[in-house]
Image (cartoon, helix red, strand yellow):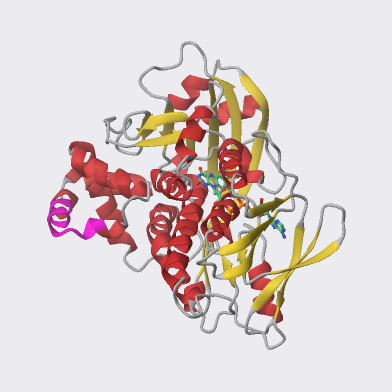
Amino acid sequence: MPNAIGRRAVVIGAGMGGLTAARAVADHFEQVLVLDQDTLPDNPADRHGVPQGRHVHALLAGGQQALAELFPKFEDALVRAGAVRLRVGLDIRVDRPGFDPFPQRDLGFDAFAMSRPLVELTVRRCVQEHASIDLRHGCRVQALVHRPDGAAVTGVRYTDAAGRAETADADLVIDASGRGTPTLDVLGALGRTPPAETTIGVDLGYASAVFEIPNDAPNDWKGAFCLPGAGRASRGSLMLPLEGHRWIATVGGRHGDLPPGDEAGFIEYAKALRTQTIYNAIKHAKRLGDIARFRFNESVLRHYQRLENFPRGVLPLGDAICRFNPIYGQGMSVASMEAAALGRLLARRARERDPLAELAPEYFAEVERIVDTPWAAAAIPDFVHPETRGERPPDFEQTLKFGGALGLLAARDPAVHRLTAEVQHLLKPRSVYRDPDLVQRVMAAMREPKVARAEEGKRS
Ligand SMILES: Cc1cc2nc3c(=O)[nH]c(=O)nc-3n(C[C@H](O)[C@H](O)[C@H](O)COP(=O)(O)OP(=O)(O)OC[C@H]3O[C@@H](n4cnc5c(N)ncnc54)[C@H](O)[C@@H]3O)c2cc1C
């Protein structure tokens, strides 16, 4: 390998972050060892290490783009596996306060809907085509190994599928363990300061059920999104198509208004959503399998970019850095975008004398840039709810009003609608909203009575 940066990279976790990271580093290391604690199925089945996989998992167009950069055959493979192509703006009915429904129009790009196990299996198969990537099941990483002076991580200690204690040396370890904490643990073991965290306490409860799509399903949408309002209307729901002519409907509420896990309770809960779109679609549909539930207490963003002297040889990625409120379907896409950015960064640094020196600050700066838009997109609506815990952004009230007026313009103007969808799908950063012409139009809309009334409604 002429441009090899090192002999071996180890990736902890074979979720979306770990799989994409493995591909991203594979061009720069002679061998990539991926270790996952789970037995990874060779069909699209749920697994223990990814309990969230039983709930709706939207793949945003920004994530799709990152996956296509890493795996040129990914989109074809996904479609062949049965994923449903969605025309963004047209195929999902969106009921949001003030617009029930929001205008449906073709915004010129696609996204795909499928189960979380299917998207992960498709990526896993793409990864398995790379001879230099060794994907090992049933291997639980116990700790990172570091140099005696603490300046660098040099590998991992793990237990293999037979229960044997093993050590793997590595020039670079990627921590894609999701809710795991190996990076935080090694910082603790080295007596270093952990990264500062921003948390937003949302106390969400999710319940999800899968249905056979009935013959009389509406033909003007393939999926539906009921966005919550505040107060009594704080329940929301997203229903998307899945492979195999099915729908997955996830309903959720906050701060104690949790959905029940029995069928009658689930349907009653859906009936009390702000609009009846999803309830009407599923009330007579045939349910398949169990109802799954999930509690998500807080979003967490770890500010690794603020740490000085981060040890060499280790980088966290995906949920190990930032766990988003899942309502906006961003986590898999952000993890894939971080992996793609890491691949580009390694390619740029490969010609330097010591490519791994100073890799961490550059990588964390990229991550900060990637996370900025999705974090803000979720945080602003979270703070509409008075029970939400955490520090409100300083410009919260103004940003909220700006968002309301931007929504009004998007409903009227297809070009603005497309722009907001591109930001929502992580194809563009939220800084595009600072365009002076757009700002002027939004300010004018903010003075309209409809926006003022909508703001009042959100707080009632
Ligand atoms: C209810 C819910 C709904 C969601 N909906 C969406 C959505 O619609 N769209 C979206 O993009 N995102 C969604 N997300 C977020 C998404 O699931 C995550 O952001 C994404 O899976 C992050 O990928 P990851 O690889 O960082 O972590 P994970 O996917 O959690 O993978 C971590 C992996 O590490 C393994 N592991 C952990 N510890 C160890 C260890 N010590 N040794 C070895 N292996 C280990 C685990 O087995 C697992 O395979 C949702 C999340 C939740 C909770």
Residue nearest the viewer, comparing 343 with 95: 343
Query: What is the x, y in percent for residue 340?
Result: 46, 56
Question: Which residue does the image show at 39% across and 43% down from the upper left?
Answer: 61
Q: In this view, does 439 lie to the left or right of 83?
A: left
- Residue lying farthest right? 163
How many marks can you see? 0
Question: Which residue does the image show at 62% across and 55% down from the upper left?
Answer: 132
Residue 276 seen in the figure: no
Is residue 437 found inside the magenta-colored segment of the image?
yes
Residue 395 seen in the figure: yes
- Residue lying farthest bottom? 149
Query: What is the x, y in percent for residue 62?
Result: 39, 48
Query: What is the x, y in percent for residue 326?
Result: 51, 48
Quadrant position of the N terminus in the picture: bottom right
In the image, residue 228 sits, relative to residue 215, either above or below, namely below
- Residue lying farthest front? 2
Residue nearest the viewer, comparing 379 with 178: 178
Question: Which residue does the image show at 24% across and 56% down from the upper left?
Answer: 433
Most common SS among magenta residues: helix
Which residues are drawn in magenta? Answer: 432-442
Q: Is residue 391 left or right of residue 288?
A: left
In the image, residue 279 sits, relative to residue 357, either above or below, namely above
Question: Which residue does the image show at 56% across and 22% down from the upper left?
Answer: 244
Query: What is the x, y in percent for residue 179?
Result: 64, 58
Is residue 182 found inside the magenta-colored segment of the image?
no
Residue nearest the viewer, comparing 147 with 335: 147
In the image, residue 277 sits, relative to residue 442, either above or below, namely above
